[in-house]
Image (cartoon, rainbow, N blue to C red):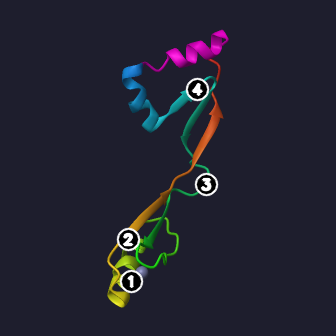
Amino acid sequence: MDGTRRRQIEAVSPEDRFTKARAVMRFADWTLSADKEGSGPIFIAECTTCDESSDAAENKADPEVWCLRHAGALGHTGFRGITTAYFRATPVEPSK
Ligand SMILES: [Zn+2]
């Protein structure tokens, strides 16, 4: 383990490791954060009875409406929501 990597790991103390993980994760000289270059999170709903699914949407409302229409049309009442989020790893800028 070289000096640069050791300093990066020590920068995140054990007590705030979970807090940091939600916003920015650091390892060695790379950092992982939400990808703002492409689309935001994608939402899909699936029926747990017949496995039919809604179209992918960039909002939760469309898949939720699909669930209600599906329940009304077929009487299926169980659904699972799937959210796909995108992350981007970027090199950490050297400290000045
Ligand atoms: Zn169904």
- The magenta span reads 1-13
Under tag 3, what secondary structure? loop
C-alpha gap between disc 1 and disc 2: 10 Å
**Residues tagged 1 and 2 counted as in contact (Cβ below 8 A):** yes
Q: Position of residue 6 (x, y in %)?
A: 59, 13
Q: Amino acid at mark 2?
A: Phe
Closer to us: mark 4 or mark 1? 1
C-alpha gap between disc 4 and disc 3: 23 Å
Q: Amino acid at mark 3?
A: Gly
Residue drawn where x is 58% and y is 31% of the image = 31
Q: Residues within 10 Å of mark 3 (few under 14, many from 20)?
A: few
Residue furthest toward the bottom? Answer: 73
Q: Residues within 10 Å of mark 2 (few under 14, many from 20)?
A: many
Q: Which residue is mark 2?
A: 79
Q: Amino acid at mark 1?
A: His
Instruction: Evaluate whether residue 60 shows in this view.
Output: no
Q: Which residue is mark 3?
A: 38
Q: Which residue is mark 1?
A: 70
Residue furthest toward the front? Answer: 49
Q: Is residue 16 left or right of residue 53?
A: left
Q: Earlier in the sequence, mark 1 or mark 3?
A: 3
Q: Which residue is mark 4?
A: 27
Which one is nearer the viewer's eye here, 73 or 49?
A: 49
Ligand 1 contact, mark 1 (Cβ < 8 Å): yes
Under tag 4, what secondary structure? strand
Q: Earlier in the sequence, mark 1 or mark 2?
A: 1
Q: Earlier in the sequence, mark 4 or mark 3?
A: 4
Q: Position of residue 91 (x, y in %)?
A: 66, 30
